[in-house]
Image (cartoon, grey):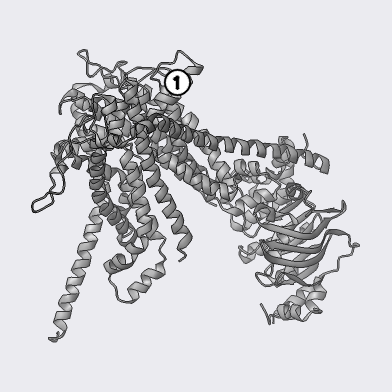
Amino acid sequence: MATVSVASSVESRPQPSAPLVPKVKASGLSFYYGAFRALKELDLVVHENCVTALIGPSGCGKSTFLRCFNRMHDLYPGNRYEGEIRLYPDDINLLAPGVDPIEVRMRLSMVFQKPNPFPKSIFENVAYGLRVRGERSGRTLEGKVEAALRDAALWSEVKDRLHQLAFNLSGGQQQRLCIARALATDPELMLFDEPTSSLDPIATASIEELIADLKKKVTILIVTHNMQQAARVSDFTAYMYLGQLIEFGRTDELFIKPKNKQTEDYITGRFG
Amino acid sequence: MPYARDLKSIRRLIAAHKRWDLVFACCGVLALMVGLLTFIALFVDMAIDGVPRLNWDFFTNFPSRHAAQAGILSAWVGSCLVMLVTAFVAVPLGVGAGLYLEEYAPKNWVTDVIEINVTNLAGVPSIVYGLLALGVFVYQFGFGQSILSAGFTLALLILPVVIVATREAIRSIPVGIREAAYALGATQWQVCKDHIIPYSSAGILTGVIIGMARAIGETAPVITIGALTFIAFLPPSPIKAEPPFLSFEWLTSPFTVMPIQMFNWTSRPEAAFLQNAAAAGFVLVLLTLAMNGFAIWLRYRLRKNIKW
Amino acid sequence: MFTQAQSPRLAQRRARVLKERAIEMVLFLAALVSVFTTVGIVYILVKESVVFFQQVSIVAFLTDTQWTPLFDDQHFGIMVLLSGTLTSSVVALAIAIPLGTIIAIYLSEFAPFKLREIAKPFLELLAGVPTIVYGFFALLFVTPILQWFYPELPGFNLLSAGIVMGVMIIPYVSSISEDAMRAVPMNLREGSYAMGATRFQTAVKVVVPAAFSGIASAYILGISRAVGETMILAVAAGMQPNLTFNPLEPAATITSYIVQVALGDLPHGSIGYQTIFAAGLTLMLFTFACNIAGHVLRKRFRETY
């Protein structure tokens, strides 16, 4: 049964030992597509250097929620936020009208469902964020790109062809390139929107490994359609359903002893 | 300069970048304005010079040595007759070709050649069609410098427009419609005749109107085949009093068309003739605007109404 | 073995199949007309040009610096006409390519939905105005304005014809470029925005490179429009052959020369008659070269999102 395998992968993991420091906190967050209320009064804390997973059946609003953090919804007309998302330690509300979405996106970075490398070379893809931030020195760029590619476990595979077009990479490599691109700018929080949904199992495994590694450096919020994946990579898990946050807790607790009946139905496979 | 890390320098950087956004948005609006202002200037220029000349006589008089008595009768009659031939040739050929390419054509090199051809023909300068017509229609086929030659030439010229519009209209019909008709036992031609052509007719019409608007303003190819610039008579009437009531003599008649009449007046030094040219130009602009506007409106309605 | 009842049905069936085949044949012929057109164009241009080149050497055609086919002292230097074509095209493209590209980027990446819905049909209307009207406008509106800034400008000149031609070509460039940019998938743009890029940065660094092959086709179409444009030049640039690259001078182009000859009454089969086919062949080869270049560019930079 699905539950058993999920539970076993949770139990074997050591607990995070360091004290928990909040990195972002959403409170009373609602989101509207025009008149349609897609998210209803969500509250969520993401702790520093932890991986937090958002799970739920498709259409539950988990991606919508994720895209609130870096204000992606501002790109399209007719969208509206209510409530706040506070970023610590500066304690600013990311959703405040006075806060520039570009500033938010410079501090948070995002990895998308489908790998979306730019039609540029591998090097220029990773350097893009730095160039957008005004970095011009070739040496700094080279150093930063190499570090990011190493962190994304891609360096050894691409170091000899940094100036080839990124489209020539395989799907899994492209996604790791997108992770490197997101890492290169030292983000305070990384958002992953179902990063493995278009990849094969081997590429998925390498991305999961990478995410588990990365949490030493950055805080991660990941949306996943796959419960096993949430159980494998995350420290905290939130279960969402119909735009509401049903349950939030430590991943092991949520998977082994869900407090809510709906959550239990979902993770035992009776639903969704 | 090291890349921006602290909030203050990030904000400064964003402000600088956003200035570029603003600068570019202004450039975009300005560029659009260039188009808009040119159009307004052109329209107003034609209207100021031409409208005083527009009266009933202008439409019912033949061209004349005296600017004040000159009119566009032979020109607009010629344009109408040429358009008639063009439509009669271009519509069946264009729709037939579009239908073949979308519904019948097998995937082979012949089809590829036809498709590449249609694309390339759309980019051939119109004057080259004039040379084709001069060599082939006027001399080889012996049509002479007639309405028939002009109509054929313009039909070939707008053929790619009609074909492309037909194909687009047909392509927007979902496969399910075809399958439903086939499932009822219809043959391929019955599917085309009863379903594909009727459902795509509005889209085809859009393409035909845009093509005709282009043909009515085309000057160069019609000059090349040798349309006369001074015609003080009308082609023989297509309708006769005695049986068989229809006559096709007009097809071989010499003729002139509106843009050529306008060109002729434009190349005269006297200001009075330039006014005539402006008046003829104003009529042409109104005509093409109305046709294109109607086609655009039709397409807009289509997109809004049809939801397969 | 058929029973009596089956055979009429079989005959009916055969008739139906025959009818279907016949209809398919007719439609196929309709589709072939476009091929015949191309073949006809090539045939007629080559045929008359061959006669022409039997009397005029290709070397003289390409190197002579005079073009006087209708005078007693005949010279056939196509360079003279090409210079007019090139100069006016450069002026036109210097206007159409930047403005068309800016409009395309603006409409695709910046403009609110409403504005785009209004601007696109408006640009189409601009492309629908007959070129003879543009020629009149160049001669009697733009030239006087230019003369106001530069009084020595002759009444016929390549500059005003080129400018008006440029405005006429803007819609072709902008509409195809915009379609190419809109075809760039949204997730590529989101990737850039998520890095903190502004609209301008996203447009210039991500969308334009991704849509490059489509934009290149738009430019190629613009070039062939400019090279093949006839009436604006025939009306506003004067029709005297003039070997010049100065847009302030009047000059004939390949196309306006053809119009000039066609306006007169040249006997079929005379050398003057054949010159227009040789000129037409030159024009055709030029457009063909542009199309090939466009094809190569598209192949080389095909979108692979």
Q: Quadrant of residue B199?
A: bottom left
For mark 1, what is the residue? C144
Residue B123 visible in rendering: yes
Task: Relative to C149, say whether A11 is above or below.
Answer: below
Q: Is residue A67 left or right of residue B305?
A: right
- The crowding category of the residue bearing disc 1, from other C-alpha atoms within 10 Å (few below 14, some 14 to 19, many at least 20), is some
* Residue A22 on image: x %, y %: 86, 60
Q: Is residue A105 left or right of residue B127?
A: right
Q: Quadrant of residue A160?
A: top right
Task: Relative to B16, say whether A14 is above or below.
Answer: below
Quadrant of the image containing the C terminus of chain B? bottom left
Q: Is residue A242 left or right of residue B128?
A: right
Q: Extreme right residue here? A: A19
Residue A11 visible in rendering: no
Quadrant of the image containing the N terminus of chain B? top right
Query: How many callouts does the rendering have?
Result: 1
The residue under the point 45% across, 25% down is C142
- Of the pair C269 and C144, the residue shown nearer to us: C144
* Residue A245 on image: x %, y %: 77, 70
* Residue B135 on image: x %, y %: 19, 35
* Residue A17 on image: x %, y %: 89, 64
Task: Relative to B25, say whether A66 is above or below.
Answer: below
